[in-house]
Amino acid sequence: MVIKKMLALVLGGLLCMNCFAACSKPAPLLKEKYNDYFNVGVALSKQTLAYYDESILKNFNLVVAENEMKWESIQPSEGVFVFSNADKLIAKAGDLDMQVRGHTLIWHSQTPSWAFAGSYEDAEARMLAHVTKVVTKYKDNISEWDVANEVLSDGDANELFRQDSGWYRACGSNDDKFVEFLAKAYKKVHEIAPDAILFYNDYNLNFPTKRAKAVKLVQKLLAAGAPINAVGMQAHYDIHGLKMTDVENSIIAFKDAGMKVSLTELDLSVYPGDYSGAPYTELSAELDAKQADVYGELFALCRKHKDTVLGVTTWGVADDATWKDNFPVKNRKDFPLLFNVSAQPKSAFQKISNF
Ligand code: G3I
């Protein structure tokens, strides 16, 4: 009898120890949950870099600078390079063992107008000098680059490139010349950082017309010898009416074009894309739940296509700091991210974590 009691005590003790160990074991981090799928990333700015707690950031294994690696930030005037803010992001990534996305080298926006000025030869020389300086500086820190961002037109099907780009105009608004210009950029990045994954990045690539343009651009770049590897779907969506079939058809189309795919700037506005909707001062339980469902469907879709999808990056960490508060409507509070205004995980974070 005594032996039975002793056995019961020992077994009970072992059970408690196991329970304690299990209960005290920290919940797996998001990046650990996605170890077998793809990178999970966030955009940080010079402001947010300084204040989000590492307990949140260590959920992620990839980071991208929201603005600090754009031309206007890095080379504000010709020949003057300012790397201090970008360096802070690189240092933070090193501290947290995060990969870094380089965003972005060639973009019509947030690029000083002097970069495009003068002859084609002038513009090309400036572009190659910028790319060489920046990519050389970070070739050991940045694993993937948005070499070109948003060069495609949102116009009708037969207009491939946006007409308001200073880079496009520097090429005489000639499609073939612009493809040659872009191909030179991809070749230069690859020459300096041969292991980096080279992206074309754009928004609305879930829409069939723009998807087709992106495929056409990839094909033209490949034909021009550009070492392009992947397409970045920015994924600035909203929770009203996003068609998962559109997103999936784009992932498949880019895969069929020989590309990998990442969702590079994911946020899910709680307002309809038509700019309607009375401003909310807080996120209702109903909208929170609906947003969680859409985040859940998007991450499930990316897990389904894990052989093609390299990463999913949200364009910010928490709802307290999002560009969506000023776009498309200025000073209209939005709630598009995985953490709330108090930097606490939302239902969406739980949803994508538990599968
Ligand atoms: O740096 C100036 C500061 O000196 C000034 O005091 C302040 C007030 O005007 O403006 C600051 O510049 C702002 C900049 O972000 C840095 O904070 C610009 O006004 C503001 O327009 C700019 O917005 C950025 C936007 O790109 C510009 O197009 C957003 O933060 C950034 O999230 C957004 O990111 C882009 C991606 O790079 C490409 N895909 C679309 C995405 C959303 O537009």
Image (cartoon, helix red, strand yellow):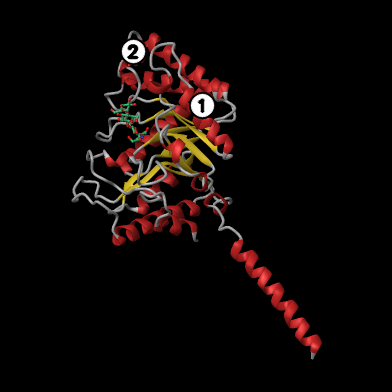
Which amino acid type is shown beneath numbered disc 1?
Asp
Left or right of 88, for residue 243: left
Mark 1 neighbour density, 10 Å: few (under 14) some (14–19) many (20 or more): some
Disc nearer the start of the sequence (1/2): 1
Where residue 295 appears, as percent x and y from the top left, is 39, 54
Write the residue at 57% across / 21% down. 192
Circle 1 SS class: helix
Query: In the figure, 167 relative to 280: above or below?
Result: above
Towards the viewer: 271 or 162: 271
Where residue 194 appears, as percent x and y from the top left, is 59, 26
Q: Residue furthest bottom?
A: 1
Left or right of 259, for residue 97: right
Give the labeled residue for mark 2.
114
Circle 2 SS class: helix
Left or right of 37, for residue 1: right
Towards the viewer: 342 or 326: 342
Write the residue at 49% across / 54% down. 304
Query: In the figure, 254 relative to 111: above or below?
Result: below
Where residue 171 appears, as percent x and y from the top left, is 34, 16
Residue 256 can be seen in this image: no
